[in-house]
Image (cartoon, rainbow, N blue to C red):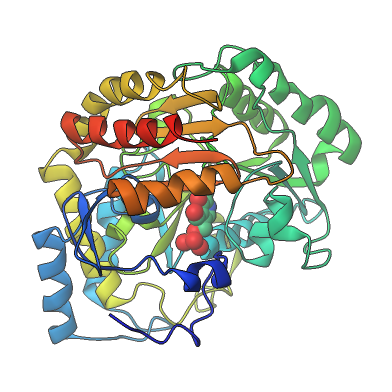
Amino acid sequence: MTINTDHYWMPFTSNRQFKARPRLLDRAAGMFYTSTDGRQILDGTAGLWCVNAGHANPHITAAIARQAGEMDFAPPFQMSHPKAFEAATDLASMMPEGLNRVFFCNSGSESVDTALKMALAFHKLRGDPMRTRLIGRERGYHGVGFGGIAVGGIAGNRKHFGPTLAGVDHLRHPLDLTRNAYSRGLPAYGAELADEFEQRLLALHDPATVAALIVEPVQGSAGVILPPQGYLEKLRAICDKYGILLIFDEVITGFGRLGTAFAADYFGIKPDIICCAKGLTNGSVPMGAVVAKQTIYDTFMQAAAADAIEFYHGYTYSGHPLACAAAIATLGVYRNEQLFEHAGKMAPHFEEAAHQLRELPFVRDIRNLGLICGIELEPLAGKPSARAYEVFNRCFWDKGVLVRTTGDIIALSPPLIIQPSQIDQLFSAIASVLKTLH
Ligand SMILES: Cc1ncc(COP(=O)(O)O)c(C=O)c1O
C-alpha cells in the first residue's frame, strides 16, 4: 500500500522517523488490530488507554451507526437532545455517591481545562475570589490545553509555550526507585510526600489563595507512577482542612482500569470533581466529561439570576449526539459484560506475568496496579528514550504486539477483555525483545 505521508502533521510523533517506515493499522476487533500489511497485532495499550471494552464491540458500533442515521448534530447551547441527558444520567449512576452533575466536552484535555475553570468560578461565585491558585504535580499529565500544561508537570510539554497560567505550583511526584522499585501494587514508602502540600506549598502561598489541587490518582503518561499507600488519603485530608477542591483526573484510570469503575472507588477517596474521557465512549467517538459534586452545581445555580447563563463555558460539540449514543452503549457494555470485574480478576495474573521480567537485561523497575504496568529500562548512554523505542518498534514489527513507551518506560494498559493467554503473549513478546537488546 503506498500512501502520501507528506501532508499529515502527526501529533506527539517523530514525524520523520515514522514516515520513513510507517506503522499503519486499518482494522480492529476484540483484542487485535490488523496492520495494513495484513498482520494481527495484539493491543497491549487499549489503543491509547481508551478501548477498554475491546475493539468494534457490536453494541457500540451499532449505536453509533443508528445515531448517525437518526440525527447528526443538535446545537448544545440553549438547545439539546434526549441522549445528552440520558448519557449524563448513566454516567452519574456509575460515579461515586454525590458526584452527579455532568458537563460534557470532547477530550481529556478539555475536561481538565473545564474542571479548572469550574473550580475557579466556584470559589468566586461562593464569595471567595482570593482562591485563584491551582496546584498540580511534577510529571503529571493533564492534556495539552494551556490549563492542562500549566498544572501538568512534564517539562517537554511546557518548555516551548511560554509562561502558561500564572499562580500555579506543583507537588513533587512520588516515584522513588531507591525505596520502591519492584513494588507490587501501591508502594509502601512515600506517603509523607503528601505532607509537603501543606508544609511547603500551602505554607508558601497561603491556603486561602488555593482553589484546587489536581492529580491523576495513578500518573500514567509520564510512565506509571503509583501513589504510595496512604498518600491520596493525606491529600484529601489537607484539601478538606483548607477548603481546597480536590480534582481527580481519571482520564486513564476511569472505566475499570483498576478493576473498579473509577480510581476513586478503588482508593475509597471521594474527590470533588472527576475528569474523564477515553473509556467513556470506548475510544469510538471523541468525548470527555467533568463530573462535579452536586453542591458545586448548586452554587452556580444559586449565584445566577434564574434566566441567566450560569457557566460561561462550553463547546460546539459538547454532548454531541454520536458521542452520547456511543457513551450510553459503552456504559451498558461495561455493566452487562461485567468488564470492570473481569479486569479485577485478571489483575493478579497480569502482575505475576509482569514481574517475571524482573531479571531481564536493562530492566530497572516494574510497577503495576489493576491492568496498568510500567517497565522502566536503563536508558542507552546519551540517547534517552532510544532503548524503549526499540522495544516498541520490534514488538510491533517482529512480535505483532502493540506496546507504548514514554521516555524509557514501557507502559501497558490492555483492553479489559484481555484473557490470561493474551497476557502471557504480551509479556513474553516484550521479554523476548528485551533479551536481544544491546
Ligand atoms: C490523565 C490524563 N489527562 C488528560 C489527558 C488528555 O486527554 P486527551 O488526549 O483526550 O486530550 C490524558 C491523555 O492521555 C491523560 O492521560
Q: Is residue 71 left or right of residue 303?
A: left
Q: Is residue 186 left or right of residue 336?
A: right
Q: Is residue 384 left or right of residue 324?
A: right
Occupied quadrant, residue 15: bottom right
Q: Is residue 273 visible?
A: no
161 over 221 or under it: above or below: below
Q: Measuring 21% from the left and 25% from the top, which residue is drawn there? A: 345
Occupied quadrant, residue 202: top right
x then y, percent, for residue 292:
48, 51
Q: Measuring 66% from the left and 42% from the top, which residue is drawn there? A: 139
Q: Is residue 146 left or right of residue 223?
A: right
x then y, percent, for residue 230:
57, 17
x then y, percent, for residue 378:
62, 31
Quadrant location, the C terminus:
top right
Q: Is residue 232 visible?
A: yes
Which sits in the foreground, 359 or 310?
359
Quadrant location, the N terminus:
bottom left
Which sits in the foreground, 290 or 82?
290
Which sits in the foreground, 303 or 312?
312
